[in-house]
Amino acid sequence: MKPAQLAVPLATGMVGIALGLALAPTIWKPAADDSPQATLTQARSADAHSNGSKSASPAGTSSPKTRVRTREESNTLQQASITIPLATLADVMKRGTLQYSSEFDSLEHALPNALTLLGANEREHEEVMKLVKASEAEILSAEQTHLKIMEANAEGIKFDMSGMRGPVEKIISSTKDGIRNCLAPDLAETLIESINWDEYYPSKPESFVRLEITRDRKGRLTAWEKSGGGGTGNGIDEAFKDDGTHLPAEEIFDDRWKPHLKGVMILPNDEE
């Protein structure tokens, strides 16, 4: 039996060059090849999934189940679409749409495109996004009791994230179950496979996050959140003067860290 497939409109443009490169050897077959690995088809109504309709295979073939996403160009014309294996689409999203956005606080920004590629309808979009935001809130709540400060001095603050491992495993499990409740089985498993759950939260024994403030050559201050996978920086309000005095960490860093930073003071360091 061939893998489940997804019909995607030719004009969708959602994965651009990455999709073209990934699918080129898979979906384009010589005219003499009768294997329906990829076919041109008319897009079905966007309401078909909610009504439980299935794509029919031509008589005498073993064409696998397909999922069709539509985008109506006019009142009378719907786009043609290409059928691609869901497994291939999962790989494309993993290496493209969701490659750098599987972290718990970034996932919601990449999911709308992923859900569109999967053909999710408006209700499914809303349900999945609501689920992901609720999971993020659970993570932030758990951090307040499971994070530990390893270091806190004038040079920076270092958090031990390993205490979050248990809570994160439970949250990931419930999030996956929630996705399965929101989407059709084949689409749910495709989305779950596309997310890099190892990157969802840094809770391995060696995981840490370090907060520090740096000063560039022009004297501008930046508040950094750094971890083993990189870091993000935000400019500091000019109200905080770099005059040699300690700065209140609680007032400078993101709300996520505030419960742990009461009374902690920090000095800027020159950028390396």
Image: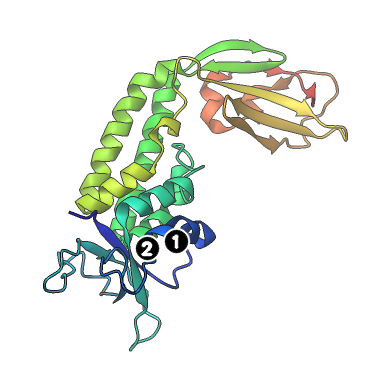
Where residue 128 appears, as percent x and y from the top left, is 32, 50
Amino acid type, callout 1: Ala
Q: Is residue 131 in view?
A: no
Q: Please tell me which residue is depicted at 31% across the width and 60% down the height of the picture.
A: 120
**Residue extending farthest left:** 60
Q: Nearer the viewer, residue 220 or 202?
A: 202
Q: Which residue does the numbered mark 1 point to in the structure image? A: 24
Q: Is residue 188 left or right of residue 22?
A: left
Farthest residue, direction front: 32
Q: Helix, strand or loop at disc 1?
A: helix
Q: Between residues 260 and 185, which one lies in front from this camera angle?
A: 185
Q: Residue at x 41, y 16 (%)?
A: 163
Which numbered marker is on residue 27?
2
Amino acid type at image mark 2? Ile
Quick one: quadrant of the N terminus? bottom left
Q: In whole angstroms, how far apart are the C-alphas of marks 2 and 1?
A: 6 Å
- Within 10 Å of disc 2 (Cα), the crowding (few <14, some 14-19, many 20+) is some
